[in-house]
Amino acid sequence: MRNPHRLLQRALMLAGAAALLAACAGPGSTSAPTGEPVLLRLIAFNDLHGNLESTGLTLPWPDPAQPGKAIRLAAGGAAHLSGTIQALRAGAPHSLVISSGDAIGATPLISALFLHESTVDVMNRIGVDLAIPGNHEFDAGKDELLRVMGGGCRPNKPDALTQSCPLGESGDSRHPGARFPHFVANVVMADGKTLFPPSVVKTVAGVRVGFIGAVTRVTPSIVVPSGVAGLTFTDEADAINAEAARLKAQGIQALVAVIHEGGDTGTPGLPLEWNDAACPNPRGAIFDIAKRLSPDIDVIFSAHTHQGYRCVVDGRPIMQATALGRGVSVADLVIDPRSGDVDRARTTHRNLPVFNERSDAPLRAAITAAEPEPFASTLRAAKPDAAVAERVAAYAQVAAPRAARPVGVIGGAFERVAKSDASAGRLVADAQWRATRDPALGGAQFALMNPGGVRTDLRCARDAAPPCAVTFGEVFTMQPFGNSLVVMTLTGAQLRQMLEDQQRPGRPAPVLLIPSSSLTYRWVARADHGQRVQDLRLAGAPIDPAAEVRFTVNSFLADGGDGFVMLREGRQRLGGELDIDALIAHLKSSPSPDPVPRITWVD
């Protein structure tokens, strides 16, 4: 069998010569198709979530010394992402960089504090060529999305925690917006037009290539309803297929789908192997969508689930590069210049890590050595982008004093560690219930919080005694994900089953969701699955299995996060505000830690 990477290198050399001839024609010229194949490198990243700094970012990587075990590989950061992209672009005569959604929303402070203008600015500097919106782009509503991407400053109120156009004093007086187009085929306005163009067509060496976008159709159920009022999120496959047919009728043969929806592969609990082309145990919405996509689609870039995979289904790759700027997906297309068709047999693709300054040097060298060419050489050549690093540092400097602003008062230390439910989790659950119990805001009877979503304790400063003020930075560190609240309905029986599934068969220990003060029960650790949840009560009264109960979780749980798939069955969903906003509002009431567990643990 001929080595596909040698074929790729030969195509690169041939296409490079063609590109040199085209460059001699001068700026703005469009080279006519020649007989040589056109090589186009597509570089995609997904779910950046405003992670501009590299601090704390890691990838779970298979441990070479212990099969089946994972180690943490430091990865990510905008300067390193940009450097990796530049190295990839240097190895190809034609390339395009794609953001597959959720570039903003659910972000660290360096993005959220500046209304995500900082992230868009950095994406411009990285050289993004085109992007689709993910569900989190709609967190602040359609109008704010259009402003952030279209440009312009928002008025800054004196008491606002956020700041628009933060670097104005250095001459950047106006947020320029995205210098790259957004496209999405399945978000339709009331007048029947799409919010953004359904596709983008790029001409590469005289060949037209079409990119068609879609975002998960469940977006309205996981964002604030008022923010997407008047928008319809249609079936992803139907929208893409309709646009593919339209582009095909224009003679465009090379088609790429960019979909903010995802899935997972492999065995749950085992380390990531994101380049296993055998694609073991594929599951999730993206694979169902792919089965229904037009056979004219040549490549599928996916997102949303923060997983890494590189599958080949029906002869075309389906790829995702985890999330947070820690990796990129690369697909090298070989296109016939006369027909415009992609030669799928010669398409090569790979997921690559974004090494950073904290990456373990021996592990980095081992990973690089194991990569096929030309990707091994690319990883060796990648260097952090100094200009991007300087820009990120400027935003970090402006963020520092704002992070220190007080936002509330606490009457004692809220801690995360506990055998059942912890006081920090109770604080968050109570805040979310308080934010959604009004009938107009969902009519929640209680709230449940996943312990992994509570990232730190909340304490008084070292020299302060309670009651004491807490800062925005401290609260944001406790709740950094920017999840929105979702109110839903289950029956009492479904609720009990979901709580029993906190420790499914085969799981050695439970992951106990932390309830607000209105919900209590006993957890009998030694009992069999199905018998551990006892004396389940709402507002002190036993819950009728047939009764409908209405409660609040964050959007991560609502989508089945942490394995709570039954929450996907929740009915009558209503989106609410962001979790951090609910917590800040609750802190204005000066809460004290509740010493009484809502879950009584019985060994």
Image (tube, rainbow, N blue to C red):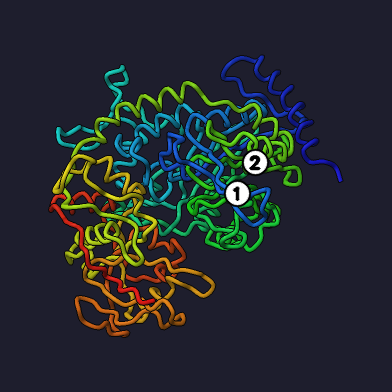
Q: Which residue is identified by label 1?
A: 319
Residue type of the residue flagged with mark 1: Met
Is residue 79 shown above or below 467?
above
Image location of residue 256, percent across then percent down: 59, 45
Residue furthest front as drawn: 463
Image location of residue 507, percent across then percent down: 51, 70
Is residue 523 shown above or below 321?
below
Q: Is residue 103 left or right of residue 166?
A: right
Q: Residues within 10 Å of mark 2 (few under 14, many from 20)?
A: many
- Pointers 1 and 2 in contact (C-beta within 8 Å): yes
User: Residue at image x 53%, y 26%?
Assistant: 384
Q: Nearer the viewer, residue 592 or 178?
A: 592
Q: Which residue is identified by label 2?
A: 331
Q: Nearer the viewer, residue 486 or 372?
A: 372
Q: Residues within 10 Å of mark 1 (few under 14, many from 20)?
A: many
Q: Quadrant of residue 179?
A: top left
Image location of residue 199, percent across then percent down: 50, 43
Sequence order check: which comes first, mark 1 or mark 2? Answer: 1
Q: Quadrant of residue 395?
A: top left
User: Residue at image x 36%, y 81%?
Assistant: 493
User: Residue at image x 37%, y 46%?
Assistant: 106
Residue 267: mark in rendering: none
User: Residue at image x 53%, y 41%?
Assistant: 326
Image location of residue 431, percent across then percent down: 22, 58
Asked which secondary structure carries label 2, the reply is strand
